[in-house]
Amino acid sequence: MRTVRLSIALLLLASPGWTDGFELSFDSLPSAQGMSYSTTQQMEGEAEVGEPDGWSVDGTTLAMNTLGTAASTVTYTLDDVSSVVNPAEPFRLSLRARVLAVEDVATLDVHAIPVRPPLLADAATEEFMGGFGLRADQVFLYSGPVDPDGWRYEGFGSWTVLDVDNTEFHTYVMVFRPADKEADFYIDGAHQVSLPMMAILPSWPADSKDRFRLGESLFFSNAQAEITQYSIAQGAGIPSVIEGSSWGQIKADPR
Protein backbone atom coordinates (compact mmCIF):
# COMPACT_ATOMS: atom_id res chain seq x y z
CA MET A 1 0.00 0.00 0.00
CA ARG A 2 1.15 3.56 -0.67
CA THR A 3 2.40 5.70 2.25
CA VAL A 4 0.74 9.09 2.65
CA ARG A 5 1.70 11.88 5.10
CA LEU A 6 -1.40 13.44 6.61
CA SER A 7 -2.01 16.00 9.29
CA ILE A 8 -3.66 14.88 12.53
CA ALA A 9 -6.90 16.49 11.38
CA LEU A 10 -6.89 14.66 8.06
CA LEU A 11 -6.28 11.35 9.78
CA LEU A 12 -9.84 11.60 11.03
CA LEU A 13 -11.12 11.40 7.47
CA ALA A 14 -11.79 8.13 5.69
CA SER A 15 -8.99 7.07 3.37
CA PRO A 16 -9.61 6.22 -0.31
CA GLY A 17 -10.46 2.61 -1.05
CA TRP A 18 -8.17 2.02 -4.03
CA THR A 19 -5.17 -0.27 -3.88
CA ASP A 20 -1.93 -0.51 -5.83
CA GLY A 21 -3.65 -2.10 -8.81
CA PHE A 22 -4.16 -5.65 -9.98
CA GLU A 23 -1.95 -8.19 -11.75
CA LEU A 24 -3.06 -11.58 -12.96
CA SER A 25 -0.99 -14.65 -12.12
CA PHE A 26 -1.02 -17.84 -14.17
CA ASP A 27 -1.04 -20.62 -11.62
CA SER A 28 -4.85 -20.46 -11.34
CA LEU A 29 -7.77 -19.26 -13.43
CA PRO A 30 -8.82 -15.62 -13.01
CA SER A 31 -11.99 -16.68 -11.19
CA ALA A 32 -9.75 -17.79 -8.30
CA GLN A 33 -8.10 -14.36 -8.23
CA GLY A 34 -11.09 -12.09 -7.69
CA MET A 35 -12.45 -11.90 -11.24
CA SER A 36 -15.91 -13.26 -12.01
CA TYR A 37 -16.55 -15.49 -15.04
CA SER A 38 -19.67 -15.27 -17.18
CA THR A 39 -20.88 -16.77 -20.44
CA THR A 40 -23.86 -15.77 -22.55
CA GLN A 41 -25.27 -17.45 -25.66
CA GLN A 42 -26.55 -15.52 -28.65
CA MET A 43 -29.31 -18.01 -29.46
CA GLU A 44 -31.58 -19.72 -26.96
CA GLY A 45 -30.80 -23.39 -26.53
CA GLU A 46 -27.12 -23.20 -27.45
CA ALA A 47 -24.69 -24.88 -25.08
CA GLU A 48 -22.90 -22.75 -22.53
CA VAL A 49 -19.12 -22.51 -22.62
CA GLY A 50 -17.97 -23.32 -19.09
CA GLU A 51 -14.82 -21.72 -17.74
CA PRO A 52 -12.65 -24.87 -18.00
CA ASP A 53 -14.03 -25.44 -21.52
CA GLY A 54 -12.76 -22.10 -22.80
CA TRP A 55 -9.82 -21.24 -20.52
CA SER A 56 -6.77 -22.92 -19.02
CA VAL A 57 -3.51 -22.00 -17.26
CA ASP A 58 -0.07 -23.65 -17.17
CA GLY A 59 1.88 -21.46 -14.77
CA THR A 60 3.03 -18.88 -17.32
CA THR A 61 0.08 -18.48 -19.68
CA LEU A 62 -3.69 -18.01 -19.64
CA ALA A 63 -4.99 -19.74 -22.77
CA MET A 64 -8.37 -19.06 -24.37
CA ASN A 65 -9.77 -21.49 -26.93
CA THR A 66 -13.39 -21.13 -28.01
CA LEU A 67 -12.93 -22.46 -31.55
CA GLY A 68 -15.79 -24.75 -32.49
CA THR A 69 -18.18 -23.42 -29.84
CA ALA A 70 -21.46 -21.60 -30.43
CA ALA A 71 -21.80 -17.85 -30.73
CA SER A 72 -21.28 -16.93 -27.09
CA THR A 73 -19.29 -14.73 -24.75
CA VAL A 74 -16.68 -15.96 -22.26
CA THR A 75 -15.71 -13.02 -20.12
CA TYR A 76 -13.86 -12.20 -16.90
CA THR A 77 -14.90 -9.12 -14.96
CA LEU A 78 -13.18 -7.29 -12.12
CA ASP A 79 -15.80 -5.11 -10.42
CA ASP A 80 -15.44 -1.86 -8.46
CA VAL A 81 -12.81 0.19 -10.31
CA SER A 82 -12.17 2.44 -7.31
CA SER A 83 -11.04 -0.56 -5.26
CA VAL A 84 -8.19 -1.06 -7.75
CA VAL A 85 -7.19 2.45 -8.86
CA ASN A 86 -8.28 6.04 -8.35
CA PRO A 87 -10.42 6.56 -11.49
CA ALA A 88 -10.01 10.34 -11.29
CA GLU A 89 -6.25 10.04 -11.88
CA PRO A 90 -4.35 8.50 -14.82
CA PHE A 91 -4.21 4.71 -14.85
CA ARG A 92 -3.16 2.08 -17.36
CA LEU A 93 -4.46 -1.27 -18.58
CA SER A 94 -1.76 -3.63 -19.88
CA LEU A 95 -2.08 -6.87 -21.81
CA ARG A 96 0.59 -9.08 -23.34
CA ALA A 97 -1.02 -11.57 -25.69
CA ARG A 98 -1.22 -13.15 -29.08
CA VAL A 99 -4.18 -14.39 -31.15
CA LEU A 100 -3.38 -17.59 -33.00
CA ALA A 101 -6.69 -18.19 -34.80
CA VAL A 102 -10.08 -16.53 -35.27
CA GLU A 103 -13.39 -18.10 -36.22
CA ASP A 104 -16.27 -15.79 -37.18
CA VAL A 105 -19.45 -17.54 -36.08
CA ALA A 106 -22.29 -15.00 -36.25
CA THR A 107 -23.57 -12.80 -39.03
CA LEU A 108 -26.09 -10.83 -36.97
CA ASP A 109 -24.49 -7.46 -36.17
CA VAL A 110 -26.75 -4.57 -35.25
CA HIS A 111 -23.98 -2.11 -36.09
CA ALA A 112 -23.29 -3.60 -39.56
CA ILE A 113 -19.62 -4.09 -38.73
CA PRO A 114 -18.30 -6.98 -40.87
CA VAL A 115 -15.84 -8.36 -38.30
CA ARG A 116 -15.29 -7.97 -34.58
CA PRO A 117 -12.35 -8.67 -32.25
CA PRO A 118 -12.77 -11.86 -30.18
CA LEU A 119 -10.29 -10.89 -27.44
CA LEU A 120 -11.16 -7.69 -25.59
CA ALA A 121 -9.67 -5.76 -22.66
CA ASP A 122 -11.44 -2.66 -21.43
CA ALA A 123 -12.26 -0.44 -18.47
CA ALA A 124 -15.45 1.38 -17.56
CA THR A 125 -15.80 3.77 -14.63
CA GLU A 126 -18.96 5.59 -13.61
CA GLU A 127 -18.09 8.34 -16.13
CA PHE A 128 -16.11 6.93 -19.05
CA MET A 129 -15.14 3.80 -20.95
CA GLY A 130 -12.29 2.73 -23.19
CA GLY A 131 -10.57 -0.39 -24.40
CA PHE A 132 -9.18 -2.43 -27.25
CA GLY A 133 -9.75 -5.74 -28.99
CA LEU A 134 -7.57 -8.14 -30.96
CA ARG A 135 -7.96 -10.27 -34.04
CA ALA A 136 -5.07 -12.19 -35.57
CA ASP A 137 -4.24 -9.31 -37.92
CA GLN A 138 -5.90 -6.22 -36.46
CA VAL A 139 -6.26 -4.17 -33.28
CA PHE A 140 -9.63 -2.51 -32.67
CA LEU A 141 -9.97 0.59 -30.48
CA TYR A 142 -13.30 1.94 -29.28
CA SER A 143 -14.13 4.90 -31.49
CA GLY A 144 -17.03 7.14 -32.39
CA PRO A 145 -18.21 10.75 -32.67
CA VAL A 146 -17.20 13.38 -30.12
CA ASP A 147 -19.74 15.56 -28.34
CA PRO A 148 -19.15 19.27 -27.52
CA ASP A 149 -17.79 18.38 -24.07
CA GLY A 150 -14.98 16.33 -25.57
CA TRP A 151 -16.34 12.85 -24.82
CA ARG A 152 -17.07 10.16 -27.36
CA TYR A 153 -20.56 8.69 -27.23
CA GLU A 154 -22.34 5.65 -28.65
CA GLY A 155 -18.86 4.43 -29.47
CA PHE A 156 -19.73 0.79 -30.20
CA GLY A 157 -20.99 1.79 -33.64
CA SER A 158 -17.47 2.29 -34.97
CA TRP A 159 -13.86 1.32 -34.32
CA THR A 160 -10.42 2.70 -35.00
CA VAL A 161 -8.58 -0.21 -36.59
CA LEU A 162 -4.80 -0.81 -36.73
CA ASP A 163 -3.25 -3.49 -38.94
CA VAL A 164 -0.94 -5.52 -36.67
CA ASP A 165 0.34 -9.10 -36.78
CA ASN A 166 -1.12 -10.24 -33.48
CA THR A 167 -0.10 -13.86 -33.99
CA GLU A 168 3.18 -12.74 -32.41
CA PHE A 169 3.26 -11.63 -28.77
CA HIS A 170 2.94 -7.90 -28.21
CA THR A 171 2.43 -5.75 -25.13
CA TYR A 172 -0.68 -3.58 -25.55
CA VAL A 173 -1.18 -0.69 -23.13
CA MET A 174 -4.01 1.79 -22.86
CA VAL A 175 -3.37 4.81 -20.63
CA PHE A 176 -6.51 6.55 -19.42
CA ARG A 177 -6.22 10.30 -18.72
CA PRO A 178 -9.54 11.27 -17.09
CA ALA A 179 -8.73 14.98 -16.71
CA ASP A 180 -8.13 15.21 -20.47
CA LYS A 181 -10.94 12.83 -21.39
CA GLU A 182 -8.46 10.94 -23.55
CA ALA A 183 -6.78 7.55 -23.74
CA ASP A 184 -3.36 6.80 -25.27
CA PHE A 185 -2.67 3.44 -26.89
CA TYR A 186 0.77 1.82 -27.12
CA ILE A 187 2.13 -1.37 -28.65
CA ASP A 188 5.48 -2.60 -27.31
CA GLY A 189 6.14 0.84 -25.83
CA ALA A 190 5.51 2.74 -29.08
CA HIS A 191 2.64 5.24 -29.13
CA GLN A 192 0.03 4.37 -31.76
CA VAL A 193 -2.88 6.75 -31.30
CA SER A 194 -4.71 8.94 -28.77
CA LEU A 195 -8.51 8.91 -28.68
CA PRO A 196 -11.27 10.66 -26.72
CA MET A 197 -12.74 8.35 -24.10
CA MET A 198 -16.35 7.29 -24.41
CA ALA A 199 -18.81 8.79 -21.96
CA ILE A 200 -20.99 6.45 -19.91
CA LEU A 201 -24.60 7.30 -20.73
CA PRO A 202 -27.34 7.37 -18.04
CA SER A 203 -29.29 4.75 -19.99
CA TRP A 204 -26.51 2.15 -19.72
CA PRO A 205 -27.22 -0.79 -17.38
CA ALA A 206 -25.34 -0.95 -14.09
CA ASP A 207 -23.29 -3.99 -15.12
CA SER A 208 -21.80 -2.08 -18.08
CA LYS A 209 -19.85 0.30 -15.86
CA ASP A 210 -17.53 0.36 -12.84
CA ARG A 211 -15.61 -2.71 -13.99
CA PHE A 212 -12.61 -4.06 -15.86
CA ARG A 213 -13.27 -6.75 -18.44
CA LEU A 214 -11.10 -9.37 -20.17
CA GLY A 215 -12.07 -12.04 -22.66
CA GLU A 216 -14.43 -12.74 -25.50
CA SER A 217 -17.25 -10.34 -24.76
CA LEU A 218 -18.85 -10.16 -28.22
CA PHE A 219 -20.95 -12.87 -29.86
CA PHE A 220 -19.51 -12.62 -33.34
CA SER A 221 -16.13 -14.38 -33.23
CA ASN A 222 -14.33 -17.20 -31.42
CA ALA A 223 -10.58 -17.42 -31.00
CA GLN A 224 -7.53 -19.28 -29.82
CA ALA A 225 -5.34 -16.87 -27.87
CA GLU A 226 -2.65 -16.79 -25.20
CA ILE A 227 -2.15 -14.16 -22.49
CA THR A 228 1.10 -13.88 -20.53
CA GLN A 229 0.46 -10.56 -18.75
CA TYR A 230 -2.62 -8.64 -17.63
CA SER A 231 -2.38 -5.78 -15.16
CA ILE A 232 -4.02 -2.57 -14.03
CA ALA A 233 -1.92 0.13 -12.38
CA GLN A 234 -2.12 3.75 -11.31
CA GLY A 235 -0.12 6.29 -13.30
CA ALA A 236 0.72 6.99 -16.91
CA GLY A 237 4.11 5.22 -17.09
CA ILE A 238 4.34 2.97 -20.12
CA PRO A 239 5.53 -0.63 -19.65
CA SER A 240 8.15 -1.70 -22.19
CA VAL A 241 9.43 -5.13 -23.13
CA ILE A 242 12.64 -6.26 -21.49
CA GLU A 243 15.21 -7.08 -24.14
CA GLY A 244 15.93 -10.79 -24.22
CA SER A 245 12.71 -11.72 -22.45
CA SER A 246 11.48 -15.12 -23.58
CA TRP A 247 7.78 -14.53 -23.07
CA GLY A 248 7.21 -10.86 -22.54
CA GLN A 249 7.96 -9.82 -18.99
CA ILE A 250 7.63 -6.06 -18.66
CA LYS A 251 9.29 -3.30 -16.73
CA ALA A 252 7.98 0.16 -15.86
CA ASP A 253 9.22 3.01 -18.00
CA PRO A 254 9.30 6.16 -15.81
CA ARG A 255 7.95 8.41 -18.57
Image (tube, grey):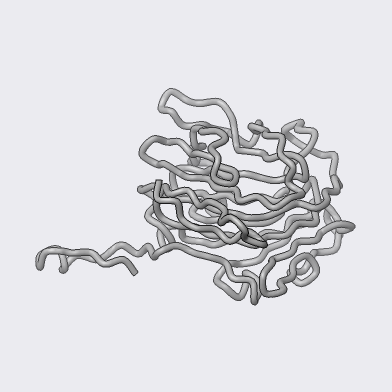
Q: Residue at x 42, y 36 (%)?
A: 181
Please tell me which residue lies in front, 218 or 190. Answer: 190
Please tell me which residue lies in front, 109 or 27. Answer: 27
Please identify the residue farthest to the left as the structure is shown: 8
Q: Residue at x 53, y 65 (%)?
A: 23
Q: How many callouts does the rendering have?
A: 0
- Lateral position of residue 90 relative to residue 25, left or right: left
Q: Residue at x 85, y 39 (%)?
A: 107
Residue 59, image x, y percentages: 67, 74
Q: Quadrant of the C terminus?
A: top left
Q: Is residue 10 above or below residue 181?
A: below
Q: Classify residue 38 by image quadrant.
A: bottom right
Please identify the residue farthest to the top as the structure is shown: 148
Q: Quadrant of the N terminus?
A: bottom left
- Lateral position of residue 130 relative to residue 62, left or right: left
Q: Residue at x 62, y 58 (%)?
A: 244
Please identify the residue farthest to the right as the structure is shown: 68
Please tell me which residue lies in front, 175 or 35. Answer: 175
Q: Classify residue 7 by image quadrant.
A: bottom left
Residue 147, image x, y percentages: 47, 25
- Lateral position of residue 192 relative to residue 39, left or right: left
Q: Is residue 64 above or below residue 109?
A: below
Residue 75, image x, y percentages: 67, 59
